[in-house]
Amino acid sequence: MISLTPQTTALVLIDLQKGILSMDTEPYPTAQILDKGRSLAAWFRAAGATVVLVNVDFGADMGDAPRGLADAAMGGERPADWADLAEDLQEPGDLRVTKHHWGAFHGTDLDVKLRRRGIDTIVLGGIATNFGVESTLRAGWEHGYNMVVLEDACTTVSQELHELAVNRVFPRISRVALSGELNFG
């Protein structure tokens, strides 16, 4: 069990938005991750802990997308609601962060919002395990936060990539747990 203090802990959910939720994912389907995110958010709110909902938006014209050479650059047309959070996810009092990179720290006010609320521990979930979740995890660790990743609240494009991140990368910079292994002390 991992014991958390509600006043100093934030749940950060990555990219539970319409465009990302339409992807095929492994090892868990996006609908399961969304349900898990909703229940975790409700549990954190009831405990008086901070809930942060992060979405990614590159703009309708992709003008806010990262630039630079890449062999598999982002691109393609997206529907108008691609960056909208899933229905019934956000509640009054939740914090919102819109990012323009994989990670939720770079170029956003996430760190300021957390520090001004006295947060020292971040619990992470979302899509995709080895993209937005991992990038946010690495930056949070580099910023000095205690990091917890919930394996059963993350998913990505393949089982292999999920397992690589969860088993090889995450344990070096965070605690890795299942949702049921958390409690508020």
Image (cartoon, rainbow, N blue to C red):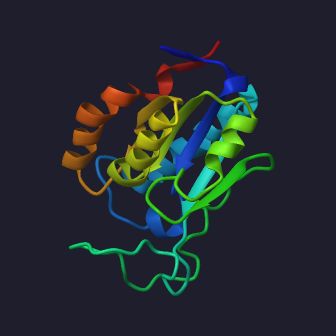
Q: Is residue 46 above or below residue 31?
A: above
Q: Foreground residue, 99 or 167?
A: 99
The residue depicted at 45 percent of the width and 36 percent of the height is: 142
Q: Residue at x 68, y 25 (%)?
A: 8
Q: Is residue 150 left or right of residue 98?
A: left
Query: Where's residue 128, x and y in %?
Result: 38, 53
Instruction: Answer above or below: position of 157 versus 153.
Output: below
Nearest the eye: 27 or 100: 100
Residue 54 lies in what quarter of the image? bottom right
Quadrant in the rendering for residue 40: top right
Q: Where in the figure is residue 153, as x and y percent of width and height?
A: 45, 40
Viewer-nearest residue: 9 or 113: 113
Q: Is residue 93 left or right of residue 81?
A: right
Q: Is residue 144 above or below residue 127?
A: above
In the rendering, at what x and y percent does residue 110 appear? 63, 48
Left/right placement of residue 151 relative to residue 53 reads left
Q: Could you tell me which residue is drawn at 23 percent across and 33 percent down?
A: 168
Q: Is residue 74 left or right of residue 103?
A: left
Estimate the x, y position of residue 127 in percent, counting from the top left: 43, 53
Question: Against 68, is 46 above or below?
Answer: above
Q: Quadrant of the C terminus?
A: top right
Q: How many marks?
A: 0
Q: Hey, which quadrant is residue 47 in on the image?
A: top right
Q: Nearer the viewer, residue 54 or 38?
A: 54
Q: What residue sits 66% from the left and 30% below the top? A: 119
Q: Residue furthest right?
A: 92
